[in-house]
Image: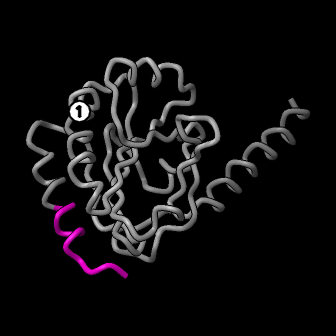
Amino acid sequence: MRESAPIARALAAGVLATLVACPVVALGDAPVGSLTLPGRTAGSPVSLDKLRGQVVMLNFWASWCGPCREEFPLLDQMYKRYRAAGVTIVGVNVEPDSSDAEGFLAKTPVSFPIAFDRDSVASRMFKVEAMPSTVLIDRTGVVRWTHKGYKPGDESEYLDQIRALVREKSP
C-alpha cells in the first residue's frame, strides 16, 4: 500500500498542474487565452488565436446527445448564412474517443469546422457542464454569452446574440 502513495501524489500533482495551466474563462472577462485543439482533418488544428477578429461560436457536443443531433443542422444553416459576415462556428466534440463522433458526423454532416477536446482542456476552460453548451466569443476574443442545453427555439436567441456581435465595430 505504501508504494502506491507516491504514485497517487504524482497523479494528483499532474491533475493539479493541468488545472492550473488551464485558466477558466469568465464571461466578459479578459480575452480568451491561447487554445488549439485537433481538427477533424489531420494537420488542421483549430486555434482560437487564428480566429481572432471573427465572432466565434463554440458548440460543445457529444455523439450520445439527442439535443445535439437536433441542433446541428440549425447551426450549419447559421454558419452558412453568417460566415461571410465574419462568424465562425466550431463544433467541439468532448468525447475521449472520436470514433463515435465520426459516426455522428456521417449521419449529420456539417460544413463548419469540428475540433476534438479529448482531454477536456477546452471543456474545463469554458466550464462546460451540459450537452450541448454554447459559448460566443467576440472579435476581440472575449466571451460574451454562454448557453447550456438546447431546446427548439433556442436558435432564435443564438441568432440575436450573433447579430449583435456582428454589428459591433471590428477592433
Q: Magenta-highlighted stretch: main secondary structure?
A: helix
Q: Neighbour class for label 1 at 10 Å: few (<14), some, many (≥20)? A: some
Q: Position of residue 85 (x, y in %)?
A: 26, 62
Which residue is pictured at 50% across the width and 60% down the height? 48
Left or right position of 144 against 123: left
Q: Residue furthest front?
A: 84
Closest to the observer, 61 or 85: 85
Which residue is pictured at 32% across the width and 62% down the height? 86
Task: Indicate whether residue 164 is drawn in magenta.
Answer: yes
Count of residue discs: 1
Identify the residue position indicated by label 1 in the image. Answer: 73
Task: Indicate whether residue 103 is drawn in magenta.
Answer: no
Left or right position of 31 against 155: right
Left or right position of 164 against 95: left
Stretch of the chain drawn in magenta: 161-171
Left or right position of 96 against 152: right
User: SS of the residue at dot 1?
Assistant: helix
Q: How is the image coloured?
A: one colour
Closest to the observer, 37 or 147: 37
